[in-house]
Amino acid sequence: MIKFKSAKVERWVTLFVVALVGGIITKLPYLKDTYYSTLEQATGSTKAQLGMLLTMYGLMNFVCYFPGGMLADKVSPKKLIIISCFGTGIVGLWYSTLPGYSSLLLIHCLFGITTVFTFWASMVKITNNLGDENEQGKLFGFLVV
């Protein structure tokens, strides 16, 4: 583990890393927004099927938000973020093989688990723990920038 001379520097580096990971980890489920026609051709999916992929992701997000918060209270948020990164990476590798439609549905469900259930509440908790109540606005403001 890296040790910093200043707790203030460590706090801002932690916030930067969490924000960076938060920005990257959520890109995979939304690839269709950038590569719509390419993804449609490569997977042989219809427009309705591609729309259903994000529907499945959204449903999993909805289901996972509340229990994800409870999980982040019971398990170390740092460990959950590491699990999220590796899990999303593994699922992303599977996604890169351009499997069939039913596998794509499962992949987007798994993205919901790795980006919301194990990641989102952990990111919020780590950010919350970086400062006192007077600094929360600044910390969360920098988190979403």
Image (tube, helix red, strand yellow):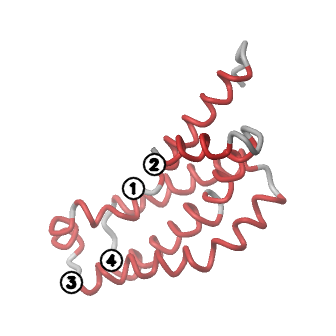
Assess whether mark 1 and mark 4 are in contact (beta carbons under 8 angstroms): no
Kindly report the distance in space between the C-alpha atoms of the residues bearing marks 3 and 1.
21 Å
Pointer 4 or 1: first along the chain: 1
Kindly report the distance in space between the C-alpha atoms of the residues bearing marks 4 and 3.
12 Å
Circle nearer the viewer, 4 or 1: 1
**Residue found at x 75% / y 58%:** 72
Return the residue nearer the eye: 79 or 97.
79
Q: Amino acid at mark 4?
A: Gly
Circle nearer the viewer, 4 or 3: 3
Pointer 4 or 3: first along the chain: 3
Q: Above or below — where is 5 with respect to 145? A: above
Question: Where does residue 37 sit, x and y in percent of width and height?
Answer: 15, 69
Q: Above or below — where is 7 with respect to 135? A: above
Q: Amino acid at mark 2?
A: Gly
Q: Residue furthest bottom?
A: 48
**Residue found at x 39% / y 74%:** 104
Question: Where does residue 124 sit, x and y in percent of width and height?
Answer: 66, 53
- Of the 4 image quadrants, the one containing the C terminus is top left
Q: Above or below — where is 72 with respect to 40? A: above
Q: Quadrant of residue 7?
A: top right
Residue at numbered disc 1 = 27
Element type at marker 2? helix
Name the mark on residue 100: 4
Kindly report the distance in space between the C-alpha atoms of the residues bearing marks 4 and 2.
27 Å
Residue at numbered disc 3 = 46
Pointer 2 or 3: first along the chain: 2
Residue at numbered disc 2 = 23
